[in-house]
Amino acid sequence: GESVGLHLPTLSVQEGDNSIINCAYSNSASDYFIWYKQESGKGPQFIIDIRSNMDKRQGQRVTVLLNKTVKHLSLQIAATQPGDSAVYFCAENRGSGNTGKLIFGQGTTLQVKP
Amino acid sequence: GAGVSQSPSNKVTEKGKDVELRCDPISGHTALYWYRQSLGQGLEFLIYFQGNSAPDKSGLPSDRFSAERTGGSVSTLTIQRTQQEDSAVYLCASSLNRNYEQYFGPGTRLTVT
């Protein structure tokens, strides 16, 4: 089926700890994946992306891991800060010939405790 | 630089009325997308425009929904004979081309009473 899912609806972490948000996808033809952060009342904000020819990509304080064998994607946030509190969505793009539309998961709410 | 802008930010309408939502993409972006987000949910793809190609309308939920993109820039999403289930945040995004990161606008919150 067409679905991108997240394993946990809410993740609560202590400030300064590392956070890991997981995502499973179902379409093995997907070749592009994106993580978005959405704060209350705002549109999603691009965090980091990864293409299917890679298994890891790092940004500033964030790392995305892609395991194509088990169709799993994760977002790691180092030294989580209160400003990281938001809903995080993974999204996939469905392979060559597609139109660029993204299929989004339901989102994981990250709560950072001071 | 200027991001994606949408107007209005909020729209309250009566059931059965038509509404138009506007999106101004980032200048130079050839791809434009419309999504819908219901309360507490993920984003649902509606329609995609890429340059002069025919749009991908596969996500439009009914024939009451339509969208145009004039001159390869501004887009308008029209919902005719609105229903209460149309209440949601309508988000527009643009990207340099397909398979590049999509930049989202702040959305239009539509409430159908």
Image (cartoon, rainbow, N blue to C red):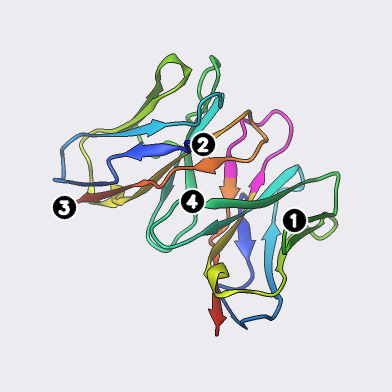
Give left or right: position of A11 versus A94: left
In primary-sequence order, the first of circles 2 and 4 is 2
Apparent side of residue A25 relative to residue B52 in the rendered image (left or right)? right
Pointer 3 residue: B113
Q: Secondary structure at mark 2?
A: loop
Lower sequence index among marks 2 and 3: 2
- The residue carrying mark 4 is B43
Residue contact at pointers 1 and 3, CB within 8 angstroms: no
Residue A7 percent location from the top left of the image = 64, 70
Does A46 lie within the magenta span?
Answer: no
Q: Residue A93 in magenta?
A: yes
Which amino acid type is marked by label 3? Thr
Asked if one can make out residue A30 in the rendered structure from this viewpoint, the answer is: no
Q: CA distance from mark 2 to mark 4?
A: 25 Å
Q: Are marks 2 and 3 on the same chain?
A: yes
Specify the amino acid type for callout 2. Answer: Gly
Mark on residue B1?
2
Specify start and end residues of the magenta stretch as a single range: A92-102
Q: Main secondary structure of the magenta part?
A: loop
Q: Is residue B36 above or below residue A96?
A: below
